[in-house]
Image (cartoon, coloured by chain):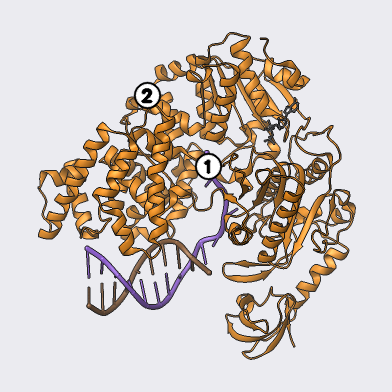
Chain colours: A orange, B purple, C brown
Amino acid sequence: MHYPNRSSLNEDQLKAVTTTDGPVLVIAGAGSGKTRVLTERIVYLVGEKKVSPWNILAFTFTNKAALEMKNRLERMIPGISESLWVGTFHATGVRILRNHGEYIGIQKWFSIYDAEDSLNLLKNLLSKNVPQGRLIRSPRVLRDTISRWKNDFLLPEQAFERAADNVERRMVTLYQEYEKELKRAKALDFDDLIVKPVKLFSIHQNIKDLYSERFRYVLVDEFQDTNPIQMAFIEALSSYHGNLFVVGDDDQSIYGWRGARVEHILNFEGLYPGTNVIRLERNYRSTRTILDAANHVIAFNKGRKGKNLWTDDEEGEKVKLVVSMDEETEAMNVLQTVLSLLEKGLERKDIAVLYRTNAQSRALEDVLKRGSVPYQIIGSVSFYDRMEVRDILAYCKLICNPSDLVSLRRIINVPRRALGKATVAKLETLAASGGIPVTELIASGEYDVGAKQKKKSKEFLKTFRVLERLARSTHAAEVIEAIIEQTDYLKYLKENYPDAESRIENAEELVAAAEAFADTHEDATLRAFLEEVALVSDVDALDEEKGLLTLMTLHNAKGLEFECVIIAGLEEGLFPHHSSLDNLDELEEERRLFYVGMTRAKKYLYLSFANMRRRMGFIEGETPSRFLAEIPERCIEGDIEGVEIWPRTEMGDELDGSDELGAPKVKGAAERKRLEFEDYSQEEVVYTVGMLIYHQAYGKGIVRKVEGSGKNLRVTILFDRGSERKFVALHAPMRPL
DNA sequence: ACCTACACCATTTTT
DNA sequence: TGGTGTAGGT
Ligand SMILES: Nc1ncnc2c1ncn2[C@@H]1O[C@H](COP(=O)(O)OP(=O)(O)OP(=O)(O)O)[C@@H](O)[C@H]1O
């Protein structure tokens, strides 16, 4: 067989596949086949250039993408995936640390902390530092800041230099203490999985050489969303041979908020002189109309490399705009749309509903349940985030790593063992001064607590020892079963939670997950299972077999494609989101996100907008997203299932007089309709209890309650139709009667 | 130590 | 609207 399979690649793709040596930058537009290029390139290297798969390292954005790539490669060249490294940055980092972490004092079986574990650690830290602790109000902000520093490759010292004020300097101090605590717990947080390998490479040149000499070819997917620490990781790993191949699309950079730098792709040639730049501009995914619409939207962004994405595909159907009264109606319209598409012969797995925020999934979920359309939600509350699952996993982590304080704190009193805050704090300090894990302290018996807590703590240790021994001799599923049994966890759930039933199901599902893990992995130890669990992402759970309609955020949809895409919630303040409205860079990132969403669609694209939406408990009037006005009129139509189309005007008009951030001043009917809403708010209406009002959407009602004042004036209305709702008076489309 | 009630506040997106 | 943190009672 000859590699590559030339008939399945166009000229540019072929060039990207066969340009093997030196730095190569592939600017791959949406749907231009970069997945195919990446795969074929590896096949070409191994099949034609006789490169050993052992010498190849490829980074993907998700574990699922890595698995799919391995499977595809395996089909083409059986046996290839055994020695080839394909994975996410984090998975690769873990692999390196398990092998060589000991060189920088990381024990082989460190715990991996996810965002919630990190948060718990920080909360505990803050509670210990009462006096200064007040300077930092939100542990979440602290956690995100530290994470951001790590992703920016800023060690505490460097972060301190840049700290702008006392609050930030205090955060740096806490960053340092947090690092110490992690070390004490023999744990790494998620960001460390890349930070530590980079540190390892910088301290031990020989280890760096070991890897970079091995990896003659390094490939990176989704390069536009790499952050500085990942870049340092890539640089180190490709340093010896310099055959670095990166693929990305500056127009699809959507993770700037967590430190990703588009500059990596924009300045790549400067960083790597002699780079071969290849552009893939032929789109194989979408219809001409969808591509036309998406191209126009993204053209509103300044500061892009610019590309001319084209397709030979048919014109296809127009983009459809659906307007609804409120989010419930929107959900119902989505359901209607889905049902009509199914009638047309599409399958559920061909349809995705995308939205900006996870909160939007609720209304959709309710309606889909009632409509009995089988669906899956990616993200939101992930299975591994459930309290009961986390409890059991905390037992697992503690068993593998008794120093893991965060896990210990979580479960030492779950189920209740009379070991409360005071007792645990005492045990912790004592253990810390002896430099031993709390479990060992209990074993030594050298601690002074109440008689009851001493007895209970000994009992806890006994259970722990049994589980520890079990973990050494058997696989994960059995250990987890034993945890549930030995601790009488299900009884605890029944006695303390009214919704115990579903929690018990989740506990059982965790056992099933561990069993499934054993079926597919040679190493099914508890440690291996924990590692897998720590690294899974939400999209990894995406199911394409069971024929499910898919609901997920636009971020999660990156890299995927569907026959039909429905994007919900196209409203100012939601998409683009509030927080990005006063910053051009962030606004442009929102636009890229919209672009990513649009370009997921192969044949059908629906855009949905609601006139009202519940936000933080209140109902607010919404105006259509500026992004809608950026779609040329020729590409879009409305009137789906009897819903009125949002009236639109010509592009030129819309651009005219747009403000600095590109918010178009829409003229014509759309503007008129919007003004109708805003007119209400301009009258300074004084609402009093008992006043009769008319609401644009809900009809007549009576004021039941008035709270707050000015911008925050809230009124509760009981409508003649029977419902009672609360509004922000300023935004509500209503007037007194 | 543990439970309940209440006040507060946050909400963007996640490997 | 909801989840979380805390005060006060048992
Ligand atoms: N040479 C080709 N001929 C025909 N179809 C192709 C070719 N290359 C790729 N495709 C098809 O184009 C579609 C998009 O490919 P792929 O998912 O790799 O795009 P992508 O570049 O990763 O897009 P994005 O950046 O938007 O995620 C796929 O369905 C793929 O099968």
Residue A719 location, x and y as percent? 66, 82
Q: Disc number at residue A654?
A: none
- Circle 2 packing at 10 Å, graded few (<14), some (14-19), many (20+), is few
Q: Secondary structure at mark 2?
A: helix
The residue carrying pointer 1 sits among few (fewer than 14), some (14 to 19) or many (20 or more) residues within 10 Å by Cα, namely some
Say whether residue A357 is left or right of residue A148: right
Which residue occupies 65% across, 20% down? A40
User: Where A300 falls versus A735 (above or below)?
Assistant: above
Report if residue A393 is visible in the image: yes
> Mark 2 against mark 1, which lies toward the viewer?
1
Quadrant where the C terminus of chain A sits is bottom right
Q: Label 1 lies in what chain?
A: A
Tell me if residue A516 comes above or below residue A381 in the rendering.
Answer: above
Where residue A96 sits: x, y (%)?
42, 26
Q: Position of residue A177 (x, y in %)?
A: 34, 46
- Badge 1 is on which residue? A541
Q: Is residue A662 visible?
A: no
Residue B11, horizontal then vertical, whole percent: 55, 60
**Rendered-image quarter of ligand 1:** top right
Residue at the image point whose x is 78% and y is 75% from the top: A679
Q: Earlier in the sequence, mark 2 or mark 1?
A: 2
Residue indicated by mark 2: A99
Residue A571 position (above or below residue A596): below
Front one among A375 and A8: A375
Q: Is mark 1 within 8 Å of ligand 1?
A: no
Type of amino acid under label 1: Ala
Q: Does the closest atom of ligand 1 sit within 8 Å of the Cβ of label 2?
A: no
Chain under callout 2: A
Task: Report how far apart the C-alphas of labels 2 and 1 lie in the structure.
Answer: 28 Å
Residue under the point 37% across and 43% down: A511
Residue in the foreground of this view, choosing between A566 and A113:
A566
Q: At label 2, which amino acid type do we have?
A: Asn
